[in-house]
Image: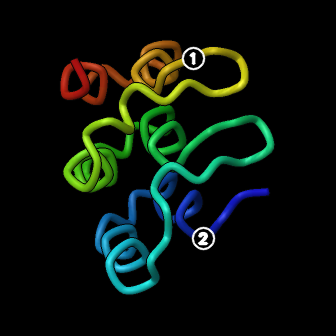
């Protein structure tokens, strides 16, 4: 299922994303049943500040594919999140 980090990322709560990682010890590469990481969710919802926090914590997260084989940048692109696409490229 989805974690609090997925929900915070998808809803653009960048401060909470930072706290969940730093104070809560949550793994930023944790996956839901579709294989999406919190970065996938932040990217597809256009939550640039959450995306920035997640990428700052682990730059390799941008290369994580979900079960459909999609990178976070592709999820952002197919959902029309141009600002996130530009940042991730």
Residue 84 is marked as none
Q: Residue at x 32, y 52 (%)?
A: 54
Secondary structure under the numbered disc 1 in the rendered image: loop
| Residue bearing the label numbered 1 | 70
Q: Residue at x 79, y 57 (%)?
A: 1
Where residue 65 appears, as percent x and y from the top left, is: 55, 24
| Residue bearing the label numbered 2 | 4
> Is the residue marked by circle 2 packed among few (<14), some (14-19), or many (20+) residues within 10 Å?
few
Q: Residue at x 38, y 75 (%)?
A: 16
Q: Which label's residue is closer to the chain start, 2 or 1?
A: 2
Q: Is residue 28 left or right of residue 60?
A: right
Where residue 35 appears, as percent x and y from the top left, is: 69, 36
Q: Is residue 76 left or right of residue 36?
A: left
Q: In which quadrant is the C terminus drawn?
A: top left
Where residue 43 appears, as percent x and y from the top left, is: 43, 35
Secondary structure under the numbered disc 2 in the rendered image: helix
> Is the residue marked by circle 1 packed among few (<14), some (14-19), or many (20+) residues within 10 Å?
some
Q: Residue at x 25, y 52 (%)?
A: 49
Q: Is residue 16 above or below residue 81?
A: below
């Amino acid at each position: 299922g989805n974690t609090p980090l997925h929900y915070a990322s998808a809803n653009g709560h960048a401060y909470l994303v930072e706290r969940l990682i730093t104070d809560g010890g949550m793994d930023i590469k944790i996956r839901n049943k579709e294989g999406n990481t919190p970065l996938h969710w932040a990217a597809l919802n256009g939550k640039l500040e959450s995306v920035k926090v997640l990428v700052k914590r682990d730059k390799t997260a941008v290369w994580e594919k979900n079960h459909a084989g999609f990178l976070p940048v592709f999820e952002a692109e197919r959902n029309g999140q141009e600002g996130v696409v530009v940042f991730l490229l």
